[in-house]
Image (cartoon, rainbow, N blue to C red):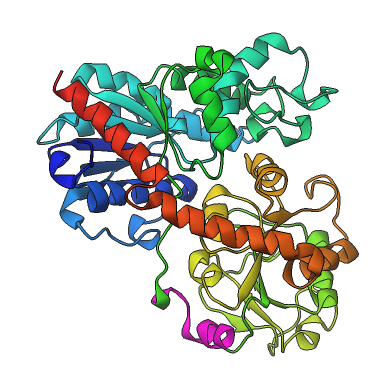
């Protein structure tokens, strides 16, 4: 299997378990599609549901080899008796995935052929115990960075070494062989050690170390130091003995029809790399005060922009678009006259949609982003530099990596979740990113990463080779 040909893998069957979050569903489906299209591997994707999941067809286009990918939505899980008003989102997700374990077992039992391996996202690690019942290999899919993976598997050790809250630590949190983590950058699950979501995070970290391997949606070019630590650092290897397979960056393909015609026409009229794309993902909502400052900052920068606006006070969102100049009353979180003053340079998009098509447009030269990993990879593979504006989850880690490790982003002097970022700072960041000579190195670096991200997925590239090694390990076990 040296050349990793699809003919050598076409007997493999892998089941992949996802939580209902779009941030997990998207990379899970992309993984299944790549296994089918590039390696001839059959995959069955199990989607845990809570009755509110988005249809998978709206998130990722079907693979070329559709017969090799099956998507099964598990029956909805009801955890209303297990959660309360104060239960954190991560805890809710862990409880839901825990309740789904019997459903996963039943779904696998009903398959015409038992899978050779099971892959779960990190919220679904409790389903790994099913593997032994069916004689399957068991893997975890880290849909975020290798740095996040390192923090997750090492956190149980930090839990023993450090007393008190991590955010109160005077120095950085040290992870063997990896970039240290600033206390203010820790993931949300580590913000309060007394909360149940922290205990769930510790459990997940321990369960990850018991699997046969971990796939991570990253690459050697993006995280060489961290991935080297998994292979060579003795302290890290003692915490995680399982191999790590960087198989990314997996991103949604660009579809020309993915943009509304009016928005495409507007972008087509703009100069190359002149437009700032502003989006905070599917769950990012700013305060009314911060939305006002952001509007002022965009206006003062005098740069063109496309802004996915999620109203902080009014819940009205539809799937249309409208130019900044509209005939309705201005929302109270926009500066008075903002819509009229910026009508020639801006577009507001009142829905999340598919940002990959916007990022890939030649007119887009910057991305003001919440630094969710899916959006970050789409920006990197489009060669678009960023203004990092992290809001929650592991986004602070991602922002730090983008600025300090990869050199493809700027960020505010203080975390946006802690202070109000002022209009002057915003306009300075935007202008630096798009036009100032001080931002040229960032723009150049973004183009370099686009090339390397494309090359690593090609046959002979590092991520392609890593996927081949992963499949070879499964196949070797099957024939043992």
Q: At which x and y percent is residue 93?
A: 49, 35
The quadrant holding residue 20 is top left
Q: Is residue 38 left or right of residue 464?
A: left
User: Which residue occupies the extreme left position in the image?
Assistant: 112
Residue at 39% from the left image edge and 47% from the top image edge: 461
Q: At which x and y percent is residue 386?
A: 67, 59
Q: Nearer the viewer, residue 270 or 83?
A: 270
- Compared to residue 66, the image places residue 480 above or below, namely above
Task: Give the total of numbered labels.
Answer: 0
Q: Is residue 385 left or right of residue 118?
A: right
User: Which residue occupies the extreme top position in the image?
Assistant: 160
Identify the main secondary structure in magenta: helix
Query: Magenta includes 267?
Result: yes
Q: At which x and y percent is residue 367?
A: 65, 64
Q: Nearer the viewer, residue 97 or 279?
A: 279
Q: Nearer the viewer, residue 447 or 212?
A: 447
The quadrant holding residue 473 is top left
Q: At which x and y percent is residue 472?
A: 25, 31
Q: Can residue 308 be seen here?
A: no
Q: Can residue 261 be seen here?
A: yes
Quadrant location of the C terminus in the rendered image:
top left
Residue at 59% from the left image edge and 49% from the top image edge: 372
Q: Is residue 476 left or right of residue 404?
A: left
Query: Magenta includes 275?
Result: no
The quadrant holding residue 175 is top right
Q: Magenta part of the protein: which range?
A: 257-268
Quadrant location of the N terminus in the rendered image:
top left
């Amino acid at each position: 299997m040296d050349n990793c040909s699809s003919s050598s893998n076409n007997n493999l069957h892998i089941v992949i378990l996802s939580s209902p979050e779009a941030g997990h569903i998207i990379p899970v489906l992309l993984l299944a599609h790549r296994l089918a299209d590039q390696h001839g591997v059959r995959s069955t994707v199990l989607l845990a549901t809570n009755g509110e999941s988005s249809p998978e067809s709206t998130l990722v286009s079907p693979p070329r080899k559709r017969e090799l990918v099956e998507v099964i939505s598990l029956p909805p899980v009801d955890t209303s008796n297990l959660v309360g008003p104060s239960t954190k989102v991560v805890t809710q997700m862990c409880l839901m995935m825990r309740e789904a374990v019997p459903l996963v077992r039943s779904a696998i039992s009903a398959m015409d052929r038992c899978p050779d391996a099971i892959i779960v996202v990190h919220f679904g690690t409790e389903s790994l115990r099913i593997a032994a019942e069916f004689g399957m290999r068991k893997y975890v899919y880290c849909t975020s960075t290798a740095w996040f993976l390192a923090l997750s598997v090492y956190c149980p050790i930090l839990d023993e070494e450090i007393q008190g809250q991590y955010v109160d630590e005077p120095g950085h949190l040290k992870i063997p062989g990896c970039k240290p983590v600033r206390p203010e950058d820790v993931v949300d699950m580590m913000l309060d050690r007394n909360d149940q979501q922290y205990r769930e995070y510790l459990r997940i970290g321990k369960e990850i170390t018991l699997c046969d391997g971990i796939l991570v949606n990253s690459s050697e070019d993006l995280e060489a130091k961290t991935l080297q630590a998994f292979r060579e650092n003795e302290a890290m290897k003692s915490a995680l003995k399982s191999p790590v397979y960087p198989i990314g960056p997996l991103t949604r393909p660009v579809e020309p029809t993915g943009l509304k015609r009016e928005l495409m026409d507007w972008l087509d009229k703009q100069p190359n790399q002149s437009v700032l794309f502003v989006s905070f993902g599917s769950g990012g909502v700013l305060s009314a005060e911060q939305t006002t400052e952001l509007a002022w900052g965009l206006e003062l920068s005098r740069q063109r922009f496309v802004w996915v606006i999620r109203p902080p006070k009014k819940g009205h969102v539809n799937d249309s678009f409208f130019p900044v100049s509209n005939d309705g009353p201005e929302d109270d979180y926009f500066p008075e006259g903002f819509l009229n003053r910026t009508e020639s340079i801006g577009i507001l998009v009142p829905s999340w949609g598919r940002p990959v098509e916007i990022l890939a447009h030649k007119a887009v030269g910057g991305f003001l982003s919440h630094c969710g990993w899916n959006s970050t990879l789409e920006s990197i593979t489009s060669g678009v530099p960023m203004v990092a504006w992290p809001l929650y989850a592991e986004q602070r880690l991602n922002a730090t990596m983008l600025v300090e490790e990869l050199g493809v982003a700027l960020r505010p002097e203080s975390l946006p979740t802690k202070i109000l970022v002022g209009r002057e700072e915003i306009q300075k960041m935007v202008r630096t990113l798009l036009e100032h000579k001080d931002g040229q190195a960032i723009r150049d670096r973004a183009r370099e990463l686009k090339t390397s991200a494309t090359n690593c997925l090609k046959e002979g590239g590092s991520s392609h080779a890593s996927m081949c090694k992963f499949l070879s390990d499964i196949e070797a076990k099957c024939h043992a």
